[in-house]
Amino acid sequence: MRILVTGGAGYIGSHTCVELLQQGHEVIVVDNLCNSKEDSLKRVQELTGRKLTFFKIDLLDRKSLIDLFDTLSVEAVIHFAGLKSVGESVNLPLRYYHNNVTGTMLLCEVMAEHNVTTMVFSSSATVYGEPKTVPIDENAPLAPTNPYGRSKLMIETVLKDLHAADKRWNIALLRYFNPVGAHPSGLIGESPQGIPNNLFPYITQVAVGMLSKLSIFGDDYPTADGTGIRDYVHVLDVARGHTKALERLAERPGVVTYNLGTGKGYTVLEVVSAFEKSSGRKIPYQIVSRRAGDSAESYADTSLIKSELGWVAEKGIDEMCADAWNWQSKNPRGYT
């Protein structure tokens, strides 16, 4: 199958390209490289021994999208492209809504004009907001607490409405919890620009000496050690979830929504301990005040994707930590 991967040079996108190429698919990547590097795609090809096609295109550039679809017979789209910083979205909401929502609408318009109606969309567990109960299943209330999460929910709504209006649309909405880790080769991994927003890249940069210490936001939650609990899932398991979703859409068209997580939560201090064990490095940290909007615990109910797709997360916290450290130690400054 010839698959267009938007945002394919990014963290999850690049790992999914590896999975697709290894399964024999033809991969076309579009990415504006605003928060990624083309080097990741060069490494994907090195890793798989297979070629992919790359176009530096912004999804807001409708003409370039049309030219691509006119030239290449795309059969399905995996849509990762988007701005992704929760904190930045609070300060720049219009930028996030314009880029993420408008970009997706333009993409869908061009797809429809070319009779391409299969999409796997990269959504997020942020659409749930602060969970009332855990584990969180796909029917939980949707109440995102920031513009980034709201942009994801808006896109989900647009895509569901597309299917309601035209049953040719086949769409999988994948709500990630906390993708972490890296390819075990150490060739590709997470390479955030500036100070990381997420726990794992922050820990790995402390371990490699780029940052002095980890800040832990709150140790007074009602959890075993007082720190927040989150569901961390290996990026390779996440990548495999996308190919499973594509298979599902080919067999049974429609709109489906799945959580991608392990179904198990770890506290921040448990993650720090696991990483110290895997890396042999001590992670200095300081406790600071809670962040507004952070919940005590959040982890997925993954029974639906297991029963319908046979997908389960295969890699545990030790592999997540080992692969993250392997990547960071071999690439101290990421792709820079």
Image (cartoon, rainbow, N blue to C red):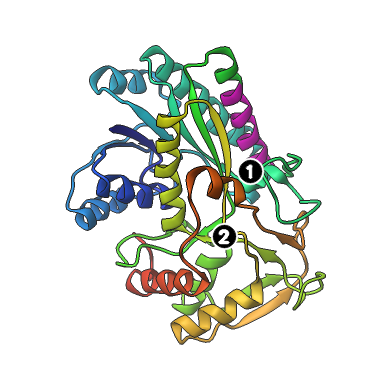
- Circle 2 sits on which residue? 262
How many marks are shown on the rendered structure?
2
Q: What kind of residue is marked 2? A: Thr
Tell me if label 1 and label 2 are in contact, CB under 8 Å: no
Q: Secondary structure at mark 1?
A: helix
x, y percent for residue 233:
52, 60
Residue 134 location, x and y as percent?
74, 56
Say which of 237 and 209 sits in front: 237
For the stretch drawn in magenta, what is the main secondary structure? helix
Question: Which is more N-terminal, label 2 or label 1?
Answer: 1
Q: Which residue is mark 1?
A: 89
Residue 220 image point, x, y percent = 82, 73
Left or right for 303, reference 170: right
Q: Quadrant of residue 289?
A: bottom right
In the rendered structure, which amino acid carries the disc numbered 1? Ser
In this picture, which residue range is highlighted in magenta? 146-160
Quick check: can you spot residue 103? no
Residue 320 falls left or right of residue 291: left
- Residue at x 59%, y 53% (from the top left corner): 177
- For the C terminus, the quadrant is bottom left
